[in-house]
Image: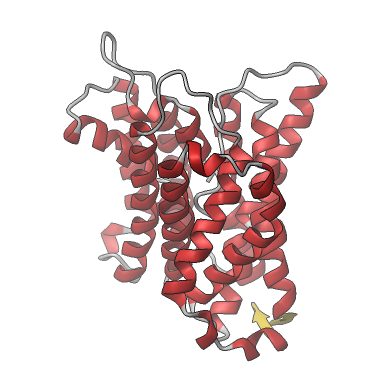
Amino acid sequence: MAVHTSVSPHHGRGNGAGLGLALASALAFGGSGVAAKPLIEAGLDPLHVVWLRVAGAALVMLPVAVRHRALPRRRPALLAGFGLLAVAGVQACYFAALSRIPVGVALLVEYLAPALVLGWVRFVQRRPVSRAAVLGVVLAAAGLACVVEVWSGLGFDALGLLLALGAACCQVGYFVLSDQGGDAGDAAPDPLGVIAYGLLVGAAVLTALARPWNAHWSVLAGSVRMDGTAVPAVALLAWIVLVATVVAYVTGVLSVRRLSPQVATVVACLEAVIATVLAWVLLGEHLSAPQVAGGAVVLVGAFIAQSAAPAAGSPEPVASGGPERELSARGTAA
């Protein structure tokens, strides 16, 4: 999902460039699941694919981390939370879900995160939320019911759905952590620095969990099948690391520095659309008409929930602002 930063939009040519960068970022993020699924089906464990993605991207982003070497002293909790939850947790759950359910369904379930954040605000923190926020939650839940076709007794793998929901919950955990972190008046950290250190933290955690020395490395030496077509496995891995992670993060950050958060959020929702279309064309994963309609409702509900204003006369809810929370909205998922 999308990286949002609270930056005033530029006008004219800057808006056009920002929109192009945002679309490029959505396309790059949307292609991660489509590239990962053939590797998983060929025999690589989902956790090993996640490790390859995160460790490879961390290596590429290492110069950025060196440039922002003061960041771990300023925001250790933020970096740890981003690495543990938004990088390792989200991506491990998402890729594990891909091994059991379609790409589009997994990503749409993950888009419940903004609605879950509002549930945390309302029922755990007992802070009021606006009517628009409630509408967004209801729409997202109704749309998800169509996506998983509840009327047919949840035809999808239950564990796969739980894993996708786990990815959404990891995003919520990071949202909540970010809401607690940082001193008032402290300058917001550079998003690229947070991403670079988050990838390093995530790579360290995943190395301990995934034990990559036990991976079936031979899979990467050959070809894998993408809807019947042979594709070099190493080419898909290069796409996942360089395009679906590094390029996706960088273009996402650069785009929101030129666009308003509202526009960036709308464009970010295209990620799920792009992922679903790519899975349809490249993997042969077809969604039914009710599922497509439900997916559209999920995205509308997620957008409303993510951009909803606080209830009148109430403290600002977690979901509506803050540079760290907005950063986590892209780049935590796919």
Residue 309 percent location from the top left of the image: 38, 19
Up-down: is 54 above or below 304?
below
Nearest the viewer among 164 and 52 is 52
The answer to whether residue 273 shows anywhere in this view is no
Residue 165 percent location from the top left of the image: 34, 56
Residue that lies at the very extreme toward the bottom in this rendered image = 218
The answer to whether residue 152 shows anywhere in this view is yes
Quadrant of res 164: bottom left
Residue 204 percent location from the top left of the image: 50, 65
Snapshot colouring: secondary structure
Which residue is at a point 60% across and 34% down the rendered structure image? 190
Up-down: is 262 above or below 138?
above
Nearest the viewer among 128 and 6 is 6
Which residue is at a point 35% across and 40% down the rendered structure image? 177
- Left-right relation of 232 to 249: right
Which residue is at a point 58% across and 40% down the rendered structure image? 70
- Left-right relation of 108 to 200: left
Nearest the viewer among 84 and 315 is 84
Which residue is at a point 61% across and 42% down the rendered structure image? 193
Quadrant of res 57: bottom right
Quarter of the figure that contains the C terminus: bottom right
- Left-right relation of 304 to 125: right
